[in-house]
Amino acid sequence: MKVTIDGIEIDVPKGTTILQAARMIGPDVAPPTMCYHSKLKTSGGYCRTCIVKVTQGSAANPTPMPKPVASCRTEVMEGMVVENTINADVLEARKGVVEFLLMNHPLDCPVCDQAGECDLQNLGYSHGAATTRYEFPRREFERIDIGKYVQLHMTRCIMCFRCVKVAEQLTDNRVHGVMHRGDAAEISTYIENVIENEMSGNVIDVCPVGALTDKTFRFKSRVWFTKPVDANCDCKKCAGKVRLWMKGDEVLRVTARKDQWGEAVDFICNECRFEKKKTSDWKIEGPSHIARTSVISQNHYEHLNELKLQVMKQQKALGFMDINKRP
Amino acid sequence: MGRKLLIHNDHIPNIHTLAVYRANGGYASVEKALKTMQPDQVTDEVKKSGLRGRGGAGFPTGMKWSFLAKPEGVPRYLVCNADESEPGTFKDRYLMEKIPHALIEGMITSSFALGAKTSYIYIRGEYFYVARIVEAAIAEAYAAGWLGKNILGTDFSHDCYVQVGGGAYICGEETALLESLEGKRGNPRIKPPFPAVAGLWGCPTVVNNVETIAAVVPIVNMGGEEYAKIGVGKSTGTKLISASGHINKPGVYEIELGITVEDFIYSDEYCGGIRNGKKLKAIVAGGSSVPILPAALAITTAKGEPRLMTYESLSDGGFLTGTMLGSGGFIAMDEDTSIVKNLFTFSRFYHHESCGQCSPCREGTGWMEKILQKFLNGTANESDVDLLWDIQSKIEGKTICPLGEAAAWPVAAAIRHFKHEFIEIAQKKKFVDISHYDRLNKLVKA
């Protein structure tokens, strides 16, 4: 099926969503997402950050769709024409969505473990306004310990439903869900039931914000001071392909590997995530690839020396003073 | 006197019982359909009648029925949406309370047309006593053989169940209703797929309003073409209007679509004019979510034609100078009404009823209510009017279900037509009388 997104035509198989098609073209035209997760079925459609304008429904029925649609849940049609970054209305609407998402968010990034790898932080940076127009008290919840390893801080939650989908699809018994409605809705384990399941730790990886955090890692380090390393082990419960976040020889935390879009590639079990905190537990493959734009790669680009030389060359060409030489 | 097709018998004592209902010509449509017609013929009659959904959207019912997927070996369902939660609308309650058999008769005839062996009537929690009335009527119908196996000796069998909801506005949205009916949290589903393809338990389902299903009865009895002669243009037949507000005679009225708004408000047959001899200030024509219209635009359209009670005429001029027929929740407001206070009441309702799934509605409805609270407190600024306008524009059309629009439209319309009231309050020239809320709060606390 041929579909045109922002003027770029691409051929995709039947059943592809607009978002997947846009991601095939590349990150420049791919809409941002918060609640969609490629590995979780029926995820997406809630946060509305990925809305796009369909200016031509299909070749057979060229009328435009009246409302913007959630690209993560809309399948492409033959000859569909989609506008994302080239449509001012879409960008304005997305700015509105970001404002709504940030409205009741505490913005406690300086003390939040997710800072540096937070989808909401990135989204706010790329699509949001610098200030808020919301002048009322923000929503607050008590912190809830759910089991030995996970802490829930609902105040930061943006209701993406991803953790509910993890519990539904990876574990055999979902014990947590959404209580109440409207802006009082909260993720709850219902009377603070403990989530005890081998795969329950994955709720931390799918959480786009700092609402679900790893208690074995809380306040240990800022993520950009740790070095991500890909490693594996023979695990009977999961694929065993993980990312270690190291400081020196110490393994501070273990997470699933995440792809270009910040979504977990393989879900991992709790034993790998919480129990194996020694380098001897793992076969280390090498440094992880982290996008250069990420704050995590601030101190350790993969080809640092090469980069330094390049920068120096550019500076020299521009006639800058060489800061390494004293006058 | 206009013709009445739905509630013409409501004055007869004990019409809620099967015996009296049958003696007054009840269940004739079931006899006619099952004995002399094919299911497709019934659908054709409904198509010919031009009947449009009476729940609010006004989608042609015959077309909706023809969209129903009919795969082999998969059950199909008819679901009656009796979760009448739109503020200002109470017509379905009246119909079910007075003549429950009209609904059940419509359910059987419609199910026959759709080939549904099972149907559900989803009644909102607040209508618990109505559910009891409908259940009693269903029991009577079962006992008399109108429901159950081999109705009237034909091979058509049908079961009808009543399900009481928890009283959430959102469960009036058809996919949220289906979720609730399945025993889940009443959250709207993301469409597509539409219920006609994958509805209740993943099976093809038609969801219709109480009044729509009840209107199938006269359509089958008199024939679609005859029914289509009532009304104007594409607005055919009769419609129940729930009239409330500052009028002399509030109540449920059955009108022939096509009478003028002026007639409806001022004639003695219907509302009987504005009470205490006051002047009309504004109307909400179809339940709280449709745009409010100032009196001048309500009586005549922007083109200068008299405005009629039809789907087309009420929406003439789009939202700039028009509104919608919606569910027929007609609220009239006199000259003393504060539009700002009225809007606050509506906004508080939508904030309370937002399901919390998608972010614009979850956060935006609460924000709008908080800003309107500032107007009531007298602490609002002029910039708050623009902010309200901006927020509603960012909710409208960006949400999963129409609740976003339902929350945004009243705000947009109030600012569009009555901006001066907001400005006067922001400039501290006028204040909203909120003593009413204080008294209410005290009552609640006591």
Image (tube, rainbow, N blue to C red):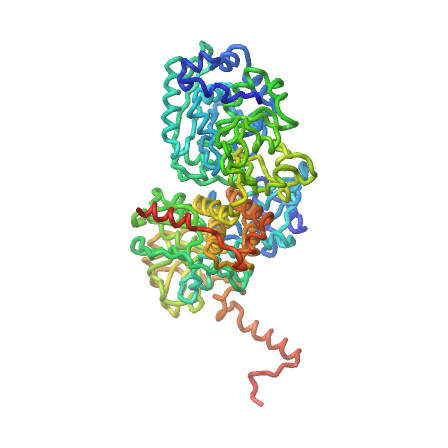
- Identify the residue at image location x=39%, y=52%: A202
Q: Position of residue A170 (x, y in %)?
A: 39, 45
Q: Position of residue A196 (x, y in %)?
A: 30, 49
Q: Position of residue B196 (x, y in %)?
A: 53, 30
Is residue A39 in sight in this rendering?
no
- Identify the residue at image location x=40%, y=66%: A111
Give the tally of numbered discs: 0
Q: Quadrant of the C terminus of chain A?
A: bottom right
Return the residue found at the far front.
Answer: B277
Front residue of B437/A114: it is B437
Q: Quadrant of the N terminus of chain A?
A: top right
Up the image or down, A317 lies above or below B304; here it is below
Q: In the rendered view, does A125 fall on the left or right side of B20?
A: right
| Figure quadrant of residue B49 | top right
Q: Position of residue A21 (x, y in %)?
A: 59, 47
- Identify the residue at image location x=57%, y=34%: B325
Return the residue found at the far right.
Answer: B303
Front residue of A120/A322: it is A120
Q: In the rendered view, does A103 fall on the left or right side of A81?
A: left
Is residue B379 in sight in this rendering?
yes
Q: In the rendered view, does B363 fall on the left or right side of A126?
A: left
